[in-house]
Image: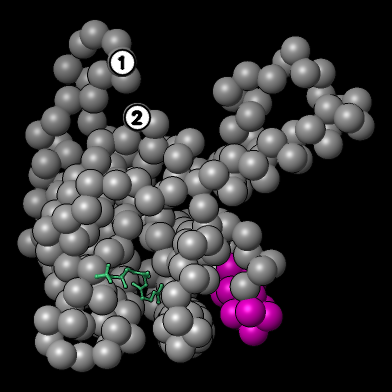
Amino acid sequence: MLEKKLEHVAIIMDGNGRWAKERGLPHLKGHREGAETVRRVVEMSKEYGIKYLTLYAFSTENWKRDKEEVDGLMELLLEFLETQLVILQKNNVRLKAIGRLKELPQEVYEALMQVIEETAGNTDGTLVFALNYGGRAEIVDAARKLAEDVRAGEINSADIDENLFRQYLYAPEIPDPDLMIRTSGELRLSNFLLWELSYSELYVTDVYWPDFGRDDFSRAIDSYYGRDRRYGGRK
Ligand code: FPP
């Protein structure tokens, strides 16, 4: 039996809309409750000793939603960045972000960079926001940078292997997720961390993200420890 570690948890936070609809509330109210769940999950991860927590906060596809919803999500993100800084500092957690960040609204981009900079020295944990993130976009961006380095003569194409390719992804220093949780029941990857999730355990719960609580998180973690990862080989 392999020794189990749970260092990195990645989450697709789904179901904010359905949560709101069932209550006759506007969609944005669901996102607002969802932001509260983000706060709770950051705390719980710290308690469980999880070193990396990656959250799918805004996908490259999310721009297609109503302008009002997109603006509301950006507003929530700004609020989160403003209010969470103290908490990240207190918990010694650093913030990172992956995605096509420069395409975010300027004030969101600047607030994000500021929190990333101010928390860069924190060492107890890493919260990673996937923002304007797409798994295919990440692989395409990596391929483009790698092609530029080959053209510049810095890399020999014969030397390209998985390890080298990985260095061109958005956050190569972060280990791949051990566990990926998706809330709200859908059995899809939705363009999330396509490269990084290759060997991750997947856990899907029907619970909507705004309702995702301590018990749900510990059930996901228990399920992880109850399974055995083999990386395609034998035990
Ligand atoms: C899916 O719900 C969730 C999102 C599109 C974005 C996640 C955003 C948050 C949790 C809130 C703000 C985040 C931060 C980091 C402060 P959905 O609207 O697709 O739900 P549905 O499928 O039920 O409609």
Q: Label 2 is placed on what type of residue?
A: Tyr
Determine the main secondary structure of the stretch shown in magenta. helix
- In the displayed structure, 153 sits above or below 20; it is above
User: Mark 1 touching mark 2, by CB under 8 A?
Assistant: yes
Which residue matches tag 2?
A: 199
Q: Residue at x 58, y 23 (%)?
A: 162
Q: At which x and y percent is residue 89?
A: 46, 74
Where residue 193 sits, quadrant-wise, is top left
- Left or right of residue 126, residue 228 in this image: left
Residue density around tag 1, few if under 14, some if 14–19, many if 20 or more, within 10 Å: few
Q: Is residue 30 magenta?
A: no
Q: Is residue 72 above or below residue 13?
A: below
134 or 7: nearer the eye?
Answer: 134
Left or right: residue 177 compared with residue 166: left
Q: Amino acid at mark 1?
A: Gly
Is residue 129 in view from this perspective?
no
Kindly report the distance in space between the C-alpha atoms of the residues bearing marks 1 and 2. 9 Å
Q: Looking at the image, how many numbered discs can be counted on the residues? A: 2
The residue located at (59%, 68%) in the rendering is 116
Residue linked to disc 1: 232
